[in-house]
Image: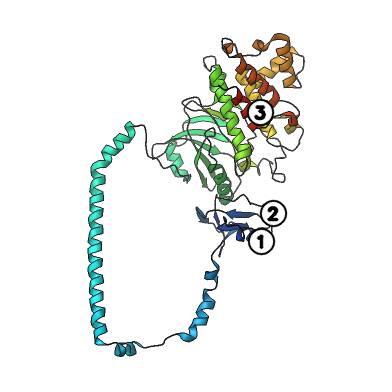
């Protein structure tokens, strides 16, 4: 059954295909027991979206996607069945029926009708009584129950991925007055929703996608859940206004603690931040249904919760901005033009090579060197370049300095009192593996997690 100009965002099966014929898409869904229907782009792109669930549907006249719902064959043959039964229709008038009905049958019918009325009345009365009792219980006990939940440290919140209106977010942020950060994609504002959740609202600049395409891309990001990834709670797609609503983390980003003189991060905390960040990136690279490259791993995009547990932020931005910055998928395997932050970008960005997950690994290695040295990447590279005249290969320069002067000369002075030399050496070993110029020599993020877990005792 066709639903034109419609779509159901999310719940795409792993059989998604970018360029297939309509018949191939239809057959893929027809012979897959998990598939409840499929979306197909009728604008020539040939995109096929098999769906495991048909939820969160919407209708937009401007979209080129139509939904085709799988229904049982018996429903498709209803007209044929009716045509076969038509010759046997009974054409009795009301008068004929009345004459044929005997008096005992009429009396029996009246008694049956009376019993139905009586049962219906008693059932209605019982339902009304139950509702009254329920309302009374709710009014009497709700205040006590609410206070008990608060005392236990819980509060009931609506955590469903939601589409907000622009006016809702404008009210929540008090007119976008409290700016807490600003990056290449736009400013971030602190806000409070009507249900008292504190949120971070990112106002995206320069998005040219239509509402339907933006909605589809955001729904993919919204379905990504991991303890070391910042949770996306909702979004706004209101004509030219495009905003994302994230959970808010009071401790802010890693750079604000690591690069300040009064910042106190011991070795255990830094090791935990390195491990948690690696887990988050490994999930994006290898465990998501639709894998994601971050493309901008840096301390500013690593946020810390109340227990200094790291959460990677701004993942999936490459999907939303690929059209306006010239960043486009190549056979579904990477990107073709540079993006990121100077100092954290892998050499292949500058060489205009095909980009894969190893670019994120390089950026992660730079973050590890910053965790160990307590210095930003730019300052660290400048110091090494000055000492060795030039520093074309960061891993080689750091290795040379450690060989000549010892590991202590590279470390943050605030870590010199730490006794766990094994963890320091592990962090440095992993960092140097990650920042190899040859990307084939860099480990995958899952391997990085293994190496760090081996010494996390």
Give the quarter of the figure containing the N terminus.
bottom right
The residue at the point 26 percent across, 71 percent down is 116
The residue at the point 29 percent across, 35 percent down is 147
* Residue 45 image offset from top left, x and y in percent: 68, 55
Q: Which residue is mark 3?
A: 363
For the residue pair 265 and 169, the one nearer the viewer reads as 265
User: In this figure, what is the number of numbered marks?
Assistant: 3
For the residue pair 309 and 327, the one nearer the viewer reads as 309
Taking 437 as reference, is 357 above or below it? below
Label 3: few (<14), some (14–19) or many (≥20) C-alpha neighbours in 10 Å: many
* Residue 327 image offset from top left, x and y in percent: 68, 41
Label 1: few (<14), some (14–19) or many (≥20) C-alpha neighbours in 10 Å: some
* 355 sits to left or right of 158: right
Mark 1 and mark 3 lie on one chain; the one further toward the N terminus is 1
The residue at the point 30 percent across, 34 percent down is 148
Q: Distance from label 1 to label 2 (Cα)?
A: 10 Å
Q: Secondary structure at mark 2?
A: loop
Residue 417 visible within the image: yes
Q: Distance from label 2 to label 3 (Cα)?
A: 32 Å
Q: Which residue is mark 2?
A: 19
Give the quarter of the figure containing the C terminus.
top right
Q: Quick check: marks 1 and 2 in contact, CB under 8 Å?
A: no
Q: Secondary structure at mark 3?
A: helix
Q: Which residue is mark 1?
A: 22
Q: Secondary structure at mark 1?
A: helix
* 138 sits to left or right of 445: left
């Amino acid at each position: 059954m066709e639903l034109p100009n419609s779509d159901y965002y999310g719940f795409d099966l792993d059989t998604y295909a970018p360029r297939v014929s309509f018949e191939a898409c239809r057959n893929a869904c027809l012979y897959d027991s998990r598939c409840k229907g499929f979306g197909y782009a009728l604008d020539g792109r040939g995109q096929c979206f098999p769906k495991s669930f048909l939820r969160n549907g919407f209708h937009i006249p401007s979209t080129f996607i139509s939904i085709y719902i799988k229904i049982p064959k018996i429903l498709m043959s209803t007209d044929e069945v009716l045509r076969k039964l038509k010759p046997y229709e009974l054409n009795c008038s009301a008068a004929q029926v009345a004459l044929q009905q005997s008096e005992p049958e009429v009396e029996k019918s009246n008694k049956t009708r009376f019993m139905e009325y009586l049962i219906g009345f008693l059932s209605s009365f019982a339902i009304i009584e139950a509702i009254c009792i329920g309302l009374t219980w709710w009014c009497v006990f709700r205040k006590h129950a609410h206070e008990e939940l608060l005392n236990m440290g819980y509060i009931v919140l609506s955590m469903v991925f939601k589409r907000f209106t622009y006016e809702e977010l404008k009210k929540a942020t008090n007119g976008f007055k409290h700016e807490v950060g600003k990056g290449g994609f736009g400013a971030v504002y602190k806000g409070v929703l009507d249900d008292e959740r504190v949120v971070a609202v990112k106002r995206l600049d320069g998005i040219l996608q239509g509402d339907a395409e933006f909605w589809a891309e955001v729904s993919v990001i919204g379905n990504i859940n991991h303890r070391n990834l910042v949770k996306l709670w909702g979004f706004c797609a209101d004509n030219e206004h495009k905003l994302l609503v994230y959970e808010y983390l009071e401790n802010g980003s890693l750079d604000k603690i690591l690069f300040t003189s009064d910042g106190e991060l011991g070795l255990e905390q830094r090791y935990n931040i390195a491990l948690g960040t690696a887990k988050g990136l490994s999930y994006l690279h290898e465990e998501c249904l639709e894998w994601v490259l971050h493309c901008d791993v840096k301390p500013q995009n690593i946020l810390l919760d109340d227990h200094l547990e790291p959460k990677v932020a701004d993942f999936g931005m490459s999907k939303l901005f690929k059209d306006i910055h010239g960043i486009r998928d190549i056979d579904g395997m990477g990107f073709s033009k540079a993006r990121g932050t100077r100092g954290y970008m892998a050499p292949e960005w500058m060489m205009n090579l095909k980009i894969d997950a190893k670019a994120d690994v390089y950026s992660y290695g730079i973050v590890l060197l910053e965790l160990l040295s307590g210095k930003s990447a730019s300052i660290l590279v400048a110091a090494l370049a000055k000492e060795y005249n030039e520093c074309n290969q960061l891993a080689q320069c750091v290795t040379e300095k450690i060989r000549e002067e010892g590991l202590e000369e590279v470390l943050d002075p605030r870590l010199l009192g730490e006794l766990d030399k094994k963890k320091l050496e592990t962090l440095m070993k992993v960092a140097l593996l990650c920042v190899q110029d040859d990307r084939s020599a860099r480990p995958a993020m899952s391997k990085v997690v293994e190496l760090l877990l081996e010494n996390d005792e």
